[in-house]
């Protein structure tokens, strides 16, 4: 049977739409697990997606952060084959709680990952970008710092870039570290819509910035930019929580050693039907 050119184009569009649009009734579910991290310690915690779901993004949160008593700094947030993992270091004070969030889609996607690693010297910064393979689009990203016993690398930026994901880390030392960035890519997927918002923090304060998805779309993942500047003093909004908040992405951060610091929160959204 011959198909006319116009009919063939129309059928092609319908097939593409069926591949990229969420299935009717599909939903992104949340799985979470928490762990207690004692002062000076580093621990990881993993959340597992339910049967029949696909992990598409990850989030994290620590219980609190104060400048007098320290707090828990997340040094890893990444996807696993069946969920996600968060890693945190308690830089001082009382025991803190680290929670890992796995966001799991009931719609069956084909997700592939790529990673890239760079050294992160003491007192320095490093940025690494990693690209999706041809035929796929970025839907989320993550990172992992290998701080050893004396490094203190942590993420000050984690966001989508054209065709991939970008992470910036800062290492206050005294030892060296490495930064690995991850991107998670959907095959046969349409690019996600990106939204952002900014929040300004006063010196030595904490606060949150939240970016909602537009009407008719649903949140898939998110990111942040703490706008690090290494001047006579360190200027940054250091995130210690980055997670979904209903149909938005919320980041909570602490402002360090500056008159003000700026936090940008990113939300990456797809059509909800």
Image: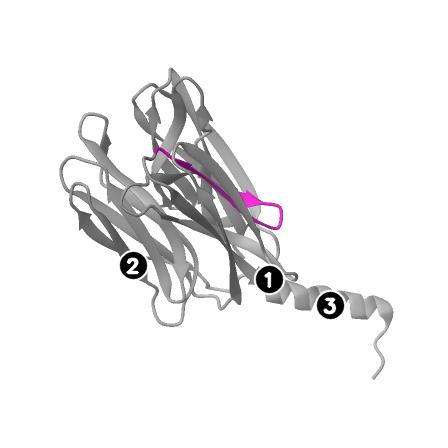
Label 1 to label 2: alpha-carbon separation: 29 Å
Q: Name the residue under label 3.
A: 12
User: Which contiguous range is marked in magenta?
Assistant: 160-172
Q: Mark on residue 46?
A: 2
Pinpoint residue 268: horizontal percent, then vertical percent. Answer: 51, 46
Q: Earlier in the sequence, mark 1 or mark 2?
A: 1
Question: Depth check: 45 or 213 in front?
Answer: 45
Kindly state the secondary structure of the residue where label 2 is placed.
Answer: strand
* Magenta stretch, main secondary structure class: strand
Pinpoint residue 251: horizontal percent, then vertical percent. Answer: 38, 37
Quadrant of the frame with the C terminus: bottom right
Report crowding for label 3: few under 14, some 14 to 19, many 20 or more residues within 10 A (C-alpha).
Answer: few
From what the image shows, is residue 56 above or below residue 157?
A: below
Q: Is residue 168 magenta?
A: yes
Q: Does residue 31 appear in this view?
A: yes
Q: Mark on residue 20?
A: 1
Quadrant of the frame with the N terminus: bottom right
Is 160 placed left or right of 4 in the picture? left
- For image coordinates 20% across by 52% down, the residue present is 35
Q: Tell us which disc is closer to us: 2 or 3.
A: 2
- In the image, farthest residue toward the top: 259
From what the image shows, is residue 240 above or below residue 57?
A: above
Pinpoint residue 190: horizontal percent, then vertical percent. Answer: 62, 56
């Amino acid at each position: 049977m011959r198909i006319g050119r116009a009919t063939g184009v129309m059928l092609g569009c319908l097939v593409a739409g069926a591949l990229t649009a969420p299935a009717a009734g599909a939903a992104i579910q949340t799985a979470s697990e928490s762990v207690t991290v004692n002062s000076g310690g580093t621990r990881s915690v993993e959340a597992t997606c339910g049967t029949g779901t696909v992990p598409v993004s990850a989030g994290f949160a620590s219980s609190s952060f104060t400048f007098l008593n320290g707090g828990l700094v997340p040094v890893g947030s990444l996807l696993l084959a069946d969920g996600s993992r968060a890693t945190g270091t308690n830089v001082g004070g009382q025991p803190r709680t680290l929670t890992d969030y796995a966001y799991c889609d009931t719609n069956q996607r084909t997700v592939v990952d790529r990673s890239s690693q760079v050294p992160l010297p003491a007192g320095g910064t490093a940025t690494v970008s990693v690209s999706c393979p041809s035929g796929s689009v970025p839907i989320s990203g993550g990172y992992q710092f290998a701080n050893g016993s004396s490094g203190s690398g942590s993420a000050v930026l984690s966001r989508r870039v054209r065709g991939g994901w970008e992470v910036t880390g800062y290492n206050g030392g005294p030892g060296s570290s490495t930064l690995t960035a991850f991107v998670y890519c959907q095959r046969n997927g349409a690019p996600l819509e990106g939204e952002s918002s900014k929040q300004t923090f006063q010196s030595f304060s904490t606060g949150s910035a939240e970016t909602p998805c537009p009407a008719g779309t649903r949140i898939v993942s998110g990111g942040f930019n703490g706008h690090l500047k290494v001047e006579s003093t360190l200027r940054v909004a250091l995130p210690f929580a980055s997670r979904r908040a209903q149909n938005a992405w919320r980041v909570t951060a602490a402002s360090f050693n500056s008159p003000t610091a700026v936090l940008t929160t990113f939300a990456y959204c797809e059509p909800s039907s």
